[in-house]
Image (cartoon, rainbow, N blue to C red):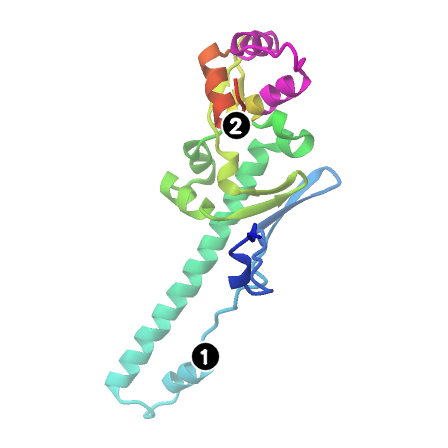
Amino acid sequence: TLDPKPGRKYAGENDVRYIVPDVTVEKVNDEYLIFVNDGSSPRLMLSPVYKDMLLQPGLCNPETRKYVDERINSAIWLIKSIEQRRMTLYNTTKCLVEAQREFLEKGIKYMQPLNLKQIAKKAGVHESTISRVTTNKYIQTPQGVFELKYFFSSGLESKHGGGRYSSLSIKHILKELIAEEDPYNPLSDQQIANKLRSKGVKISRRTVAKYRMEMGIDS
């Protein structure tokens, strides 16, 4: 007799909030194009009334003229700041697309390890700026919709040297190995570690156990 979804009676019909991506990446021919989705944002502009006030001599006293002039400068600064933030988002996405091109082409197994410092260096801004501009921002890609923070992950070294594997790609491979195992004779963490090493991933049994627990997979 109980309601399995007791919160439903308090919700309205239009309460479903879908994610609207802030940036869209589309592949056209062999090139990835980036579109900042700001169409739903209001366009800010200066009211011509106040500009006309400054152009008409004798209409305003010096104190009013100074006040209006200060407000116009403040408004221009705000509009420029919003445009600069938009360009920072565009440049950050461009750097991410360049770094994660293989992921966009082939999927999560080809995700590259990446940190804020690397993207900040490429974009020519501070790490804190990249952190702010990627917080609660979403990107639509040929592989799906992701939070921009999703592209930043730690990595492990390759056994062959020179390369690194993203923790996200390793988790994906680990999940595939477990999905393919014999349910009556499941793989141990050590066996999984050995299989990953055979694929060139430099990983310990303890790290396998850590990744497995993070994905909610029992031993």
Q: Establish if 45 lies above or below 140.
A: below
Classify 205 as above or below 131: above
* Of the pair 2 and 161, the residue shown nearer to us: 2
Badge 2 amino acid: Met
Q: Note whether 56 is above or below 93 in the view shown.
A: below
Disc 2 residue crowd, few under 14, some 14–19, many 20+, Cα 10 Å = few
Judge whether residue 109 can be spotted in this image: yes
- Tell me residue 29's x, y (percent): 75, 40
Total numbered labels placed on residues in the image: 2
| Residue 151 located within the stretch drawn in magenta | no
Residue underneath mark 1: 47
Q: Quadrant of residue 143?
A: top right
Q: Residue at x 44, y 47 (%)?
A: 133
Question: Which amino acid does the dot numbered 1 rest on?
Answer: Ser
Does dot 1 land on a helix, a strand or a loop?
loop
For residue 204, say whether it is visible: no
Q: Residue at x 48, y 17 (%)?
A: 209
Residue behind mark 2: 215
- Write down the quadrant of residue 176 in the picture: top right
CB contact under 8 Å: marks 1 and 2: no
Front-lying residue, 174 or 189: 189
Percent of width and height locating residue 199: 61, 11
**Which residue is pictured at 54% across the width and 62% down the height?**
9
Q: Outermost residue, front direction?
A: 1
Of labels 1 and 2, the one closer to you: 2
Question: Is 185 within the magenta?
Answer: yes
Q: Which residues are magenta?
A: 172-201
1 or 2: tag closer to the N-terminus: 1
The Cα–Cα distance between marks 1 and 2, rounded to whole angstroms, is 54 Å
Label 2: element kind = loop
Q: Residues within 10 Å of mark 1 (few under 14, many from 20)?
A: few
The percent coordinates of residue 25 (x first, y second) are 63, 45
